[in-house]
Structure formats: C-alpha cells, structure tokens
Amino acid sequence: MKIIVLNCGSSSIKYQLFEMETTEVLAKGVAEKIGLHGSFIKHERNDGIQVKIEGEILDHQAGIEYILGILKSEKYGSIKDFNEIDAVGHRVVHGAEAFKGSEFITEDVIKEMEKCIDLAPLHNPPNLKGIYAMQVLLPDVPQVGAFDTAFHQTMPAHAYMYAIPYSLYKKYGLRRYGFHGSSHRYVSARAAEILKKDISKLRIITCHLGNGASIAAIVGGKSIDTSMGLTPVEGLIMGTRTGDLDVGVLLYIMQKENIDHFNANILVNKHSGMLGITGVSSDMREIETAAAEKNERAILGLDMYYYRIKKYIGSYAAAMGGVDAIVFTGGIGENSPEAREEVCKNMEFLGLEFDNDGNRGKRGKEVIISKPGSKVIAMVVPTNEELVIAKDTEQIVLESLKNK
Ligand code: AMP
C-alpha cells in the first residue's frame, strides 16, 4: 500500500510518500511560498535524486497538483500512475473535543473539522485546504485526518480545565487541548519498545523540543497532562513563543503599549520566547553559539529554557507518582547534548543517574543517556510524526475495506 502524507501550512505543503509494506519513504519534499512571490518545490527521491522546481503556485490545490505531477514524472517520480496511491493522510492541528483519534474523512467529519477553525484560525484552514484539494484531484482515494490534539484527549478534567468561569468552557470549548500528539505518542511507544517493556506499566515524560516545544506525562501509554493548552503558546519557552506567562503581563503590555488583540497575538507567538529574550535568534544552534561566546542574554535565555523544562519534569513526576523514563525528541531534544545535560542535571533525587559521557556528541539517533542501573532512564528517540499518520491512515483504510 502506498500512502501520501500531507502537512499543509498557511504557505507551505510538506509531503512524504510511503511504501507501507516496508515503511520506506519513497519520496518527500516541500512546496513553499504558496500564494507568494518566489514559490518553489524541493523534492527528494529515496535514491538521492533531488530537484528544486521554481514557478508560481497560486494556492494549495495548485501546489498539490504540482507535487502529484512530480511524483508521477518519469525523471523524478516514484509512481507510474495515480491509482498506485492508495490513501492520503493529513496532519490536522486542532480536533478539539470532537476527535479522540485519527478519522476517515467524510462530509460529516469535514463539518466537525470546520467547527474547530475558531480554535486554530491559522492552522486548521490550510489543513482543510489540503483535504478539499485532494477531494478534487484524487476523488476516489480515501483520506484520513490525524489530529495533533487527539492523543491528549485522555487528559482528565482536572488537568485540562482552566480556572475561568465554567460557562466559558461550555460556550467556547476553552480548555487545554495540547499539541504534538503524534510525536508524543510515537516516541513514548518507541521508548517502551527500545526498553523491551510493556507500555501499559510505564510512566513516561516525553520532551518534544523543537521550534515549538511541549512536554507530556504519559501513564500506561495515555497522555494525562501536557504543557500546551488551548493554543500552542502555553508551556515551555519556545523559539518565538512565550510559553507560560502571567496573563497580567499581557494585559499590562496591551494597555501600556496600546496594542490590540491582533498585535498581542503576534507578540506572544512571534516576538517572544528565545528570540525575544536573547535578541540573537529563535534558532537554538545560533543561541548556543552566542552563549559560548559569552553573550549574556543568550546565557540567560538558555538558563530560562532549561529551568522551565526541569520544572515541568518535576511537576509531571509528582503528577504521575514517579517516572520511569524521560524521552527527548524534536530538533533540540535530538541534537543538543548540552540541552539534555542541563535539563537532567541534579536529578539524582528523582532516581536519574545521567550519563554525561554517553550523552556527549550524540545527535539524531536512538540512544540511552542514563547510566546502567539508573532507576529513571533518560533517552533520545528521534520523532517521526509522518510515519504515525501513515500508519493510522493504513489501519483506518484497511478497516473500512473490511467493513465494506
Ligand atoms: P524542529 O522544529 O523540531 O525542526 O527543531 C528546530 C530546532 O532544532 C531549532 O531551534 C534548531 O536550532 C534546533 N537544532 C537543530 N539541530 C541542532 C543542533 N545540532 N544543536 C542544537 N540545536 C539544534
């Protein structure tokens, strides 16, 4: 079975074509600057052949049409005919309370997804555009939506409720949903596999540290808490997002700087986080370099960054009554031994004997970074959200064929 996974953003489409028998990625790429000047598609086939195609891409449908054209092309393609594509899996950011797992896309499901737009006005509309486009371009091919929020739907009410008037939760669905669900799900399951332990008996803290960052407490394979909330701005400090912030700070800034809702949103999402603190960059590599050169704000930013993660690990260990494994993933979690070492420092009280030598120099691969015999195991597991979406899609499509 061949499955194409699409991740449609406001001006980009990331894609991967999977051969599910082997879970091999046959081709992958990204269309960027859709609807803007200078659109292009970067495509890579699994034999290493790469191409960058420039040309105007007016909208998502046009972008997907180009992508399908490349996938079928003689020179760069991986398929001879579109009927080789058995299904499409879409990453969808917000599924609110309606979606507790991935779903076969029907008109009713699309209606429910459209209702979630209010909660993720920047993310869900482009996700939906990818779905509408595929309905036109490959009308007979089944589609599945995989929601970033779905994995966290197992959170208990005391973890997901905000202490605001209850009527507002009922009226608008204002509660914590959490994101990066496919990533937290994948790395926690993979960690159990690596450790050869039954996930139903494990308490795992997964740290997804990328441009966006979130941390989750997973008991028996189920998320019981996570750091992102109604939107992906809550929780850890991120590249350009504040993470946890006293709402009073935002109200104060809005009043003193005379900024409206639109600009307040940009402030907390685009101008804050590591970029706002350090003034150097939102990119961790550049911040680490600046800190090594004794840039004081870069050093402060890193200290704040590590400290926030540490606090969450402590609070989730308390919430779970202990922890068996701490898993690092995402661009920073997978590639920054410094970040892992700083976060795991002085955690002996928790039962974590961190292995500095085993951690040093390890980038982008599965590795255990606690000492043998450590009660709490620390490890790195590179994430693979696309594979989760592809596998969910395969399973749902096979089930629907069985029931026909
Ligand atoms: P992601 O959003 O998961 O792609 O992660 C992006 C983040 O990972 C950026 O802040 C990068 O600077 C960071 N990153 C990637 N490689 C490294 C590295 N070798 N050392 C530190 N940070 C890295």
Image (spheres, helix red, strand yellow):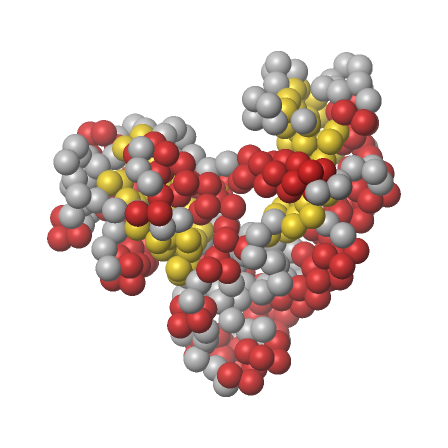
Q: Position of residue 92 (x, y in %)?
A: 64, 51
Q: Quadrant of the N terminus?
A: top right
The quarter of the displayed image where residue 39 is located:
top right
Left or right: 259, with 374 as reference point: right
Q: Quick check: 18 above or below 74?
A: below
Residue 137 seen in the figure? yes
Quadrant of the picture in which ligand 1 is shown = top left
The quarter of the displayed image where residue 365 is located:
top left
Q: Nearer the viewer, residue 182 or 313?
A: 182
Q: Position of residue 198 (x, y in %)?
A: 33, 40
Left or right: 195, with 161 as reference point: left
Q: Position of residue 218 (x, y in %)?
A: 37, 52
Left or right: 312, with 187 as reference point: left
Q: Residue at x 60, y 23 (%)?
A: 21
Q: Nearer the viewer, residue 377 or 291?
A: 377
Q: Residue at x 58, y 79 (%)?
A: 170
